[in-house]
């Protein structure tokens, strides 16, 4: 039986509809979620990503502003801009579009964003909270992967999961999120020996290595759920890290590229922005002021 194709566009649209309702409720209470995006330079891909994020905000009623700066902006000027947005009450989320031009320290820039406005989920404070299993703003792509699994009915608790890739942006947080949902997780990388032996045991595979054809049909068992995070250009085509043609006939579920994980990344960015705005409201309630814990989400 061919795999169920996990439609990221459809699931993302459903979530955006839910977010639009949350935004309406927040606005009724006097809060309009606001997202500020900083775009440095004129990288074509980054420009497209920023435009898509702006459209996503418009779709669900989030206020957005784009701060375009030249590639030769100084580190100090960029940090100063972030500092102003940190204290802007109309802005609940700050995103710096990566990669930054050479000469700018990405790590320092990410650290300058206040953790509660870090809607990318990259700040070390938020990464530490994720590791500790605490409520925090989650990295958008790994969070999107989990939502795709959950909304597609893929069993996670008790499953054996394999994550291909150990990046701080996708691989490591994806492994942590899978563990939080009671999967048993193995992280594989370029130095992993006997990779196929490991992937053949998996009930869930998240492929995030940035290399086309990394996972092939002879490397999986029947019925596995495959989440393909890769986006690679091969000729005039966009392909993932998974050899879709050989994997799909054996898998139980699989995400296509494009149209799988990609649409979820921006959707979860919007979700983080709405969450950050809601957290701001909670901080002003009497319960929050008295130090009472918030209800777990």
Image: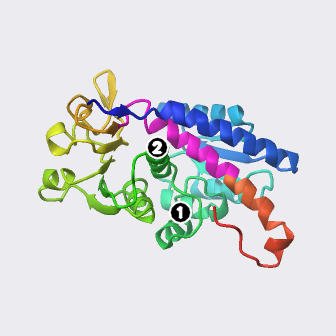
Residues at badges 1 and 2 in contact (C-beta under 8 Å)? no
**What secondary structure is marked by label 1?**
helix
What residue is disc 1 on?
108
Numbered tag placed on residue 148 in the rendering: 2
Query: Hey, which quadrant is residue 244 in on the image?
Result: top left
Residue range corresponding to the magenta coloring = 254-274
Instruction: Name, please, the residue furthest toward the front.
Output: 1
Select label 1 or label 2 by which is in front. 2
- Mark closer to the chain start, 1 or 2: 1
Residue at x 47% of width, y 70% of height: 131
Q: How is the image coloured?
A: rainbow
Pointer 1: residues within 10 angstroms few (<14), some, or many (20+)?
few
Is 102 left, or right, of 21 in this rendering? left
Pointer 2: residues within 10 angstroms few (<14), some, or many (20+)?
many
Picture layout, residue 289 above or below residue 117: below
User: Horizontal and vertical percent for residue 233?
Assistant: 32, 30
Q: Main secondary structure of the magenta part?
A: helix
**What secondary structure is marked by label 2?**
helix
Residue at x 44% of width, y 61% of height: 181
Does the image show residue 66? no
Residue at x 54% of width, y 57% of height: 138
């Amino acid at each position: 039986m061919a795999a169920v194709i996990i439609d990221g566009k459809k699931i993302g649209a459903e979530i955006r509809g839910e977010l639009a309702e949350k935004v309406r409720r927040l606005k009724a209470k006097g809060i309009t979620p606001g997202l500020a995006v900083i775009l440095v330079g004129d990288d074509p891909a980054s420009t497209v990503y920023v435009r898509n994020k702006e459209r996503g905000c418009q779709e669900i009623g989030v206020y957005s502003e784009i701060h375009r700066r030249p590639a030769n902006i100084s580190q100090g000027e960029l940090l100063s801009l972030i500092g102003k947005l940190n204290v802007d009450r109309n802005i609940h989320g700050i995103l710096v579009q990566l990669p930054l031009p050479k000469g700018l320290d990405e790590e320092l820039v990410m650290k300058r964003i206040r953790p509660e406005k870090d809607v990318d989920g990259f700040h070390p404070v938020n990464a530490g909270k994720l590791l500790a299993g605490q409520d925090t703003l989650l990295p958008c792509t790994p969070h999107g992967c989990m939502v795709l699994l959950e909304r597609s009915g893929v069993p996670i608790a008790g499953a054996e999961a394999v994550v291909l890739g150990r990046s701080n942006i996708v691989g490591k947080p994806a492994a942590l999120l899978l563990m939080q949902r009671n999967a048993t997780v193995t992280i594989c990388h370029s130095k992993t020996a006997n990779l196929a032996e490991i992937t053949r045991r998996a009930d869930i595979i998240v492929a995030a290595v940035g290399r086309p054809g990394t996972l092939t049909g002879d490397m999986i068992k029947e019925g596995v759920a495959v989440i393909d995070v890769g986006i690679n250009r091969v000729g005039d085509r966009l392909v993932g890290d998974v050899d879709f043609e050989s994997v799909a006939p054996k898998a139980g579920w699989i995400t296509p590229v494009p149209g799988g994980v990609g649409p979820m990344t921006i959707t979860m960015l919007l979700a983080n922005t709405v969450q950050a705005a809601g957290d701001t409201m909670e901080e002003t309630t009497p319960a929050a002021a008295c130090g009472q814990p918030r209800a777990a989400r």
